[in-house]
Amino acid sequence: MAQISEHKYPHVSLWQIFTLFFTIGITGFGGGMAIVALTERLVVREKQWVTSEEFLHGLAFGQILGPFSLNTCTFVGYRLRGVSGGVLAAVGFMLPSFLIVSLLAWLYLRFQHLHLLKKALSATNPVVIALICAVVLDMGKKQVRGLNGLLLALAAFAAVALFKLNVALVLVAGLVWALASALWQREH
Amino acid sequence: MLSLAWTFLKVGLLFFGGGYVLLPLLQHLLVEQYQWLTLQEFLDGVAISQLTPGPLAILATFAGVRIGGFSGGLVATICVFLPCVVLMLLVGRWYDRLKEINLIRATLDGVLPAVVGLVASAAWSLGSTLAGVQQWLLLVGAFVVFRYTKVNPMLMILGAGLLGMLV
């Protein structure tokens, strides 16, 4: 395997990988970037399993491919111990959340008609919608640039909210459009 | 169970540009197309999945448990995360050779405005579950807090839940 730096990979056992990412999966509250910061602290600074440069590259790819907190864990695990390292890091990181949500979902479905739970959830619903609105505004400020971007955002919104088009279809159409304009810009 | 697996695998293949694109996707599939969940249950599921450190996509676990019990939750979770884990393993493998990275980046950056629009459409339809002045006031208040402070969303949701029980 060709490495970009002379960093020597320490020998890390699969069990060590699993337990470390499991711990991150339990304690990493505070959203995606907070988890990445915690991971960086542990695997780069403290244990020196990977270099800072490699970690940042992994993060960049992870952001392209969706849930970057999980993706960064998978990447680090892979660099240390190949496919089994990557899979164990991913499973270790997700396991606590999976167990918590399964338990809460079970409780929710069992006690859905409980008066107190209903009252609690009727108060959390507006907060969840507010969170989504805040994310829209935040993402919009960062990602929607220029008239083209604004038109694309409005078109996607209208297609789904007003014309009830299939979300996946709109997303794929957006991707094709983005690829075409990226190719266009490269040629000109 | 097979259609459940296939549905979540499809979703897993489509989610880039941050976990939030999952909201309109899953809402469309689970609530409108297959009617496995009501809009209310979907919203409660989002609240519950925000209580964990996992990415927002852990919402798939909630939906899976609702549809097919514990095994449904397990299948949904594995399927929704399988594509990104496999892709990330490939990235780790071809790390040094990803030459077309600029084009990929430009394409994915280019689609982000559409993602913003799609997430906004999710907020739009979820808003239809709100009833009464109290809930709208809570929405505005929470929005202001999210907008101007860095408070942890998990704490806000827990706090709102407690408030709802007391009032």
Image (cartoon, coloured by chain):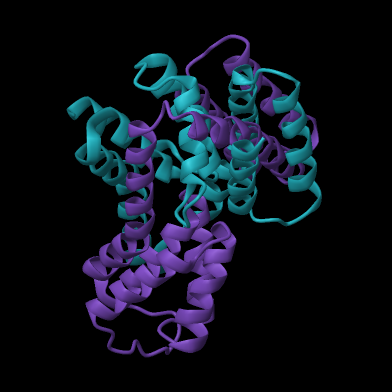
Is residue B113 in sight in this rendering?
A: no
Quarter residue A145 falls in: top right
Note the chain letter of the cyan one.
B
x then y, percent, for residue B10: 33, 32
Q: Which quarter of the figure is the C terminus of chain A placed in?
A: top right
x then y, percent, for residue A26: 42, 65
Q: Disc count in the image?
A: 0
Rendered view: B122 above or below B95: above
x then y, percent, for residue A127: 65, 37
Who is closer to the viewer here, A163 or B130?
B130
Q: Which quarter of the figure is the N terminus of chain A placed in?
A: bottom left
Who is closer to the viewer here, A32 or B152?
B152
Is residue B39 in sight in this rendering?
A: yes
Q: Residue at x 43, y 81 (%)?
A: A50
Is B3 displayed left or right of B10 in the figure?
A: left
Is A151 displayed left or right of B75 in the figure?
A: right
Quarter residue A2 falls in: bottom left
Q: Residue at x 43, y 69 (%)?
A: A24
Note the chain letter of the purple one.
A
Who is closer to the viewer here, A165 or B151?
B151
Q: Residue at x 41, y 29 (%)?
A: A112
Is B6 displayed left or right of A28 in the figure?
A: left
x then y, percent, for residue B127: 64, 22
Rendered view: B8 above or below A20: above
